[in-house]
Amino acid sequence: MNPNSLAPQTSFWLEDFVDRNLLVRMLCSFSKSTGLKAILVDSKGNTLVSTDDEIKDCRFCTMIRSSQGGFSKCKRSYARACMEAAKYGEPYIFRCHAGLIMWAAPIVMDNNLASIICGQVLMWEPEDYFLDEIEEMVKGLDIDVAAVKWSAAQLDIMSSDKVQAAADLLFIVANQIMKTGATVLEQRRKIAAQQAQLAEEIHARKQAEIAMRTIESRSLSIYSLDKEYELRAKIRNGEAKAAQKILNQILTDVIEKPLDNLDAAKTHIIELVVAISRAATESGADPNQLLKLNSSFYRQIL
């Protein structure tokens, strides 16, 4: 295995909150606008997402990472930067094991940690003492030391102001990723809360209907028109809490229906979506937005 290769495209915790394509697009946009390589790493320094398609590693880093020992040292540098950035909650500017200036922006969400790493630059002209230091740093690695020193002399040089500005911009990107993930997390918590309400409704229904166990008697109450009319009225009047309570009752009816008639349950739910949409439109909701939401609902149901 080539140690310079990227981590495999497997799932990781952040993808539970933010789509991988969005992560790649955000990092690529940053790289295109700044001309700097950006990668997303986990707390152990493993590369999760890279902008290799836009900007490759500099020649210096490519040579360092071509050695298994150099690759391992890069991972340790990234892991330490990830932890330090999370500790301070701000961009962390550091010098990697090979002497280059880099910076990290933390992503902390739901007790998980990752970081965006950027840099591969110098903040000063590479003088003789620095090149000697490079030779000492790469000692023991299976690489051409002379070629590494030559590539070090070709590295981009950035002023401290530009480095700080790039670090601040990277921090904004990281915060936007966290904001997107937090929105998804909040939606899931709301869904979990509604499921808990439904579970309570089902339990209460079972306790109250001990004597009503036959399919015939229960089918009389499933998805009644009276409940639908009442639900639509509450939506039109903007009575959100009352509408939610009735909706939970209707969904409980549908969920409790025997699963040997799943198509009927799907039909009931689609009819319910249509009824809610009509009532919402009558109360002033945007029809285009409802159409977009309904298309998503129908795909999930079917």
Image (cartoon, helix red, strand yellow):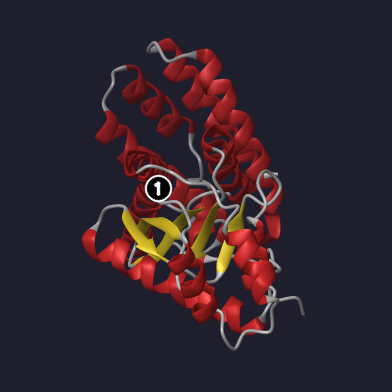
- Position of 6 with respect to 34 (left or right) is right
Q: Nearer the viewer, residue 245 or 34?
A: 34
Percent across and percent down for residue 301 are: 64, 44
Residue 211 appears in the figure: no
Percent across and percent down for residue 91 are: 31, 52
What quarter of the picture does the N terminus occupy? bottom right
Which of the 4 image quadrants contains residue 296?
top right
Q: Is 166 rendered above or below residue 18?
A: above
Q: State the residue lying farthest toward the left.
A: 88
Seen at 67% across and 79% down, the residue is 67
Q: Is 61 rendered above or below residue 277?
A: below
Seen at 55% across and 29% down, the residue is 293
Residue 73 appears in the figure: yes
Q: State the residue lying farthest toward the front.
A: 128
- Position of 53 with respect to 51 (left or right) is right
Q: Nearer the viewer, residue 237 or 110?
A: 110
Kind of residue indicated by mark 1: Ala
Percent across and percent down for residue 8 are: 69, 68
What quarter of the picture does the C terminus occupy? top right
Q: Nearer the viewer, residue 88 or 208?
A: 88
Q: Secondary structure at mark 1?
A: helix
Percent across and percent down for residue 112 are: 38, 67
Count residues near mark 1 (Cα–Cα under 10 Å), then give few for <14, some for 14-19, many for 20+. Answer: many
Task: Name the residue tied to disc 1.
Answer: 174
Seen at 42% across and 15% down, the residue is 285
Q: Nearer the viewer, residue 107 or 94?
A: 94
Q: State the residue lying farthest toward the bottom.
A: 140
- Position of 156 with respect to 79 (left or right) is right
Seen at 51% across and 67% down, the residue is 131
